[in-house]
Image (tube, helix red, strand yellow):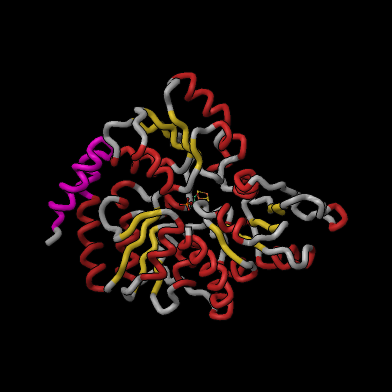
Amino acid sequence: MTTTTSIYEKLKAKLDRVVPDFELRHKAEIAEEILRLKEERNAVILAHNYMEPALFYSVPDYVGDSLELSRKAAAAEQDVIVFCGVRFMAETAKILSPDKTVLLPAERAGCSLAASITAEDVRKLKAQFPGVPVVTYVNTYADVKAECDICCTSSNAAAVVESLGTDTVIFLPDEYLAKNTAKETGKHIIFPTRMPPEQFDASLDYQLVGWHGRCEVHEQFTVEDIENARRQFPDVLVLAHPECSPEVVEASDYSGSTTAMVQYVKQHKADKYLILTECAMGDNIAAENPDKEMLRMCSIRCPHMNEITLEDTRDALLHNRYVIDVPEDVRERAFRSVKRMIEINAKD
Ligand code: 13P
Ligand code: SF4
């Protein structure tokens, strides 16, 4: 049986260097309540890699990046999915598992990328570039996904773009992920937001028409941050999420999805790593790799991911909140784009 003491001991072993003892004792009590409620409600808890350490290491059935958690949501057998992440992730779970009750523990957990684009924006671009396939980052809301041909995540963007086999792709809404993907695939990129059709250069081998959306967290990391770290710690390995600018990605040693970064640290022998993504993930990696040092920039946080706490997760199960719903006509169309993405990656 899982007791508060056993949860506390497990957390203590993992997080002794990361979270103060009194906090661990308090969090263990809440985690015990959550595990009991999870059983009672036949729920599964999915948690993104950005969750705070005490949550990340106590209650989730699965942790991971957007793609991994989408797969878990699609395969869930329980009645309830509690999504410890942001709204677009919980919506994606609902799109894939419409018969389940999907709960998002904090109502206001949004995302600057998802907020940067509307379905109407996509319709206008499709009218401007008829026949050009539309890829949208999974960090969008269901009505935007419903307008596109296929979704992608940070871990499969290049594979998705390449799978289309066309000369031209509209890639929305993350400007930086679009540019990084264009670079990775070795293709040309055209970028203006509302480009007049006469400026569209059909002679280029490949074109990504990007929208000017950015992640409010990753756009803040700079090449100077990397140079400062390298000056102080010449052996540091720098990891940047592909939502960072192409200049930052270029100056880094590695760029990949959140889970890819976790794996990278695990597989490398260096002592020090600069983690250019949400700071809580640096804590989680540090806990897993006690012999390695994680440098993180904790003044830059994702306010949306930070909305989700253990307390909210308990209250979500207790009060059945906040229920995620997607209108069925939108869901059906969004499902096609998400499903197509999941199938492509499965072949990799
Ligand atoms: P991942 O799919 O790499 O986990 O990214 C999600 C995200 O929102 C990063 O900011
Ligand atoms: Fe959105 Fe950026 Fe937060 Fe990820 S880190 S959820 S992309 S705002």
> At 37% across and 70% down in the image, what residue appears?
75
Drawn side of residue 28 relative to residue 231, left or right: left
Decide which of 293, 343 is in the foreground and name it. Answer: 343
| Residue 287, picture quadrant | top left
When the figure is inspected, residue 345 is found, relative to residue 187, above or below; the finding is below
User: Residue 1, how many percent across, how many down?
Assistant: 11, 62
Decide which of 261, 124 is in the foreground and name it. Answer: 261
Residue 24 among magenta residues? yes
> At 64% across and 69% down in the image, what residue appears?
147
Drawn side of residue 160 relative to residue 86, left or right: right
Residue placed furthest toward the right: 198
Drawn side of residue 262 relative to residue 143, left or right: left
Drawn side of residue 248 relative to residue 206, left or right: left
When the figure is inspected, residue 16 is found, relative to residue 313, above or below; the finding is above
> At 52% across and 63% down in the image, what residue appears?
344
> At 39% across and 63% down in the image, what residue appears?
83
Secondary structure that dominates the magenta span: helix
User: Residue 243, how many percent across, how many down?
Assistant: 56, 46
When the figure is inspected, residue 140 is found, relative to residue 248, above or below; the finding is below
Q: How many numbered marks, from 0 up?
A: 0
User: Residue 7, how many percent across, how many down?
Assistant: 18, 52
Decide which of 203, 15 is in the foreground and name it. Answer: 203
Residue 332 among magenta residues? no
User: Residue 290, how many percent across, how many down?
Assistant: 27, 35
* Residue range corresponding to the magenta coloring: 3-26
